[in-house]
């Protein structure tokens, strides 16, 4: 499947070029990368622009300031769909917490599913180099979301995923309000309610190699409030086929 990998960035100059190079080495020649940079003051966009001049598979979108992860993905999805850039869209963090070696498996999964999630919380998935506090926050947050919303996904907040562009085009993703990790489970609720074939595959998630985490009090608060908003706004009957895969293929 023709694939476009979307990478939102803010101050990721230490990671971005190595990540792009690894992704392009691991993918077929017709795959490409789309970086969405939120005006990084560390020069992330300039590095990507230089790489772009040497490899046409790399695309860059720049925005005037730090507008948030959710809106970065919305802008990228809009461009990919409007320009017909891909059949499969991959989302990945810029900090190497998501290993590029899993991307090909996510893409293969989209041959039989509409949404494939690289999951920390299915059998075989795990987390490395996180503090007990971060582990508790993530594990508890996912159980909280599932309990309140009924979303049958083990890793509701995972940012590593692949989705079919034809299915995404039927999802009103621009209506998703959160900008942080709550954006993920809000989007996946839309997929689920529209009958998406959803699959989870196990991955090993590793704390970022370089740079600082961008989690904030606002992101945590958003994650506490958004599940309740989703619950009260239920007006579509779920009709999804959800499959958990606990081994690699």
Image: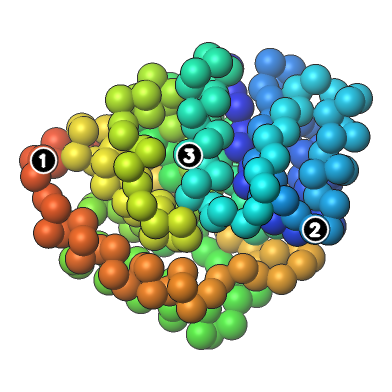
Q: Is residue 86 left or right of residue 195?
A: right
Residue occupying the point 80% across, 20% down: 56
Q: Quadrant of residue 85?
A: top right
132, above or below 25, in the image: below
Residue 43: image location, x then y, percent: 85, 52
Kindly state the secondary structure of the residue where label 3 is placed: helix
Residue occupying the point 54% across, 26% down: 79
Residue 19: image location, x then y, percent: 77, 45
Which numbered mark, 1 or 2, is in the foreground of this view? Answer: 2
Kindly state the secondary structure of the residue where label 1 is placed: loop
Q: Nearer the viewer, residue 174 or 199?
A: 174
As drawn, the label of residue 41 is 2
From mark 1 to mark 2, how far is it between C-alphas? 43 Å
Residue occupying the point 44% across, 80% down: 136
Q: Is residue 236 left or right of residue 247?
A: left
* Classed neighbour count for the residue bearing mark 1: other residues with Cα under 10 Å, few (<14), some (14–19), many (≥20): few
From mark 2 to mark 3, how far is it between C-alphas? 22 Å
* Classed neighbour count for the residue bearing mark 2: other residues with Cα under 10 Å, few (<14), some (14–19), many (≥20): few
Residue 7: image location, x then y, percent: 64, 43
Q: Quadrant of residue 29?
A: top right
As drawn, the label of residue 236 is 1
Residue 60 shows up from this direction: yes
Q: Quarter of the image for the N terminus: give it.
A: top right
Question: Tell me, what colour scheme is on the image?
Answer: rainbow
Kindly state the secondary structure of the residue where label 2 is placed: loop
56, above or below 137, in the image: above
As drawn, the label of residue 74 is 3
Looking at the image, tell me whether mark 1 or mark 2 is earlier in sequence order.
2
Looking at the image, tell me whether mark 1 or mark 3 is earlier in sequence order.
3
């Amino acid at each position: 499947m023709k694939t476009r990998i979307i990478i939102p960035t803010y101050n990721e100059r230490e990671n971005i070029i190595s990540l792009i190079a690894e992704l392009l080495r691991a993918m077929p020649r017709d795959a490409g990368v789309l970086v969405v940079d939120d005006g990084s003051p560390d020069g992330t966009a300039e590095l990507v622009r230089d790489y772009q001049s040497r490899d046409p598979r790399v695309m860059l979108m720049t925005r005037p300031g730090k507008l948030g992860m959710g809106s970065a993905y919305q802008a990228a999805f809009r461009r990919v769909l409007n320009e017909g850039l891909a059949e499969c869209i991959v989302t990945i963090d810029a900090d190497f917490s998501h290993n590029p070696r899993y991307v090909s498996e996510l893409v293969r999964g989209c041959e039989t599913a509409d949404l494939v999630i690289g999951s920390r919380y299915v059998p075989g998935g795990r987390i490395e180099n996180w503090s007990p506090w971060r582990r508790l926050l993530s594990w508890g947050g996912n159980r909280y979301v599932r309990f309140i919303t009924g979303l049958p996904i083990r890793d509701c907040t995972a940012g590593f995923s692949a989705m079919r562009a034809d299915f995404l085009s039927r999802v009103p993703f621009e209506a998703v309000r959160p900008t942080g990790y709550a954006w993920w489970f809000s989007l996946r609720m839309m997929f689920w309610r529209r009958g998406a074939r959803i699959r989870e595959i196990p991955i090993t998630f590793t704390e970022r190699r370089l740079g600082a985490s961008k989690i904030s009090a606002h992101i945590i608060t958003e994650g506490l409030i958004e599940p309740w908003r989703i619950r009260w706004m239920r007006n579509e009957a779920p009709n999804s086929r959800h499959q958990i895969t606990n081994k690699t293929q």
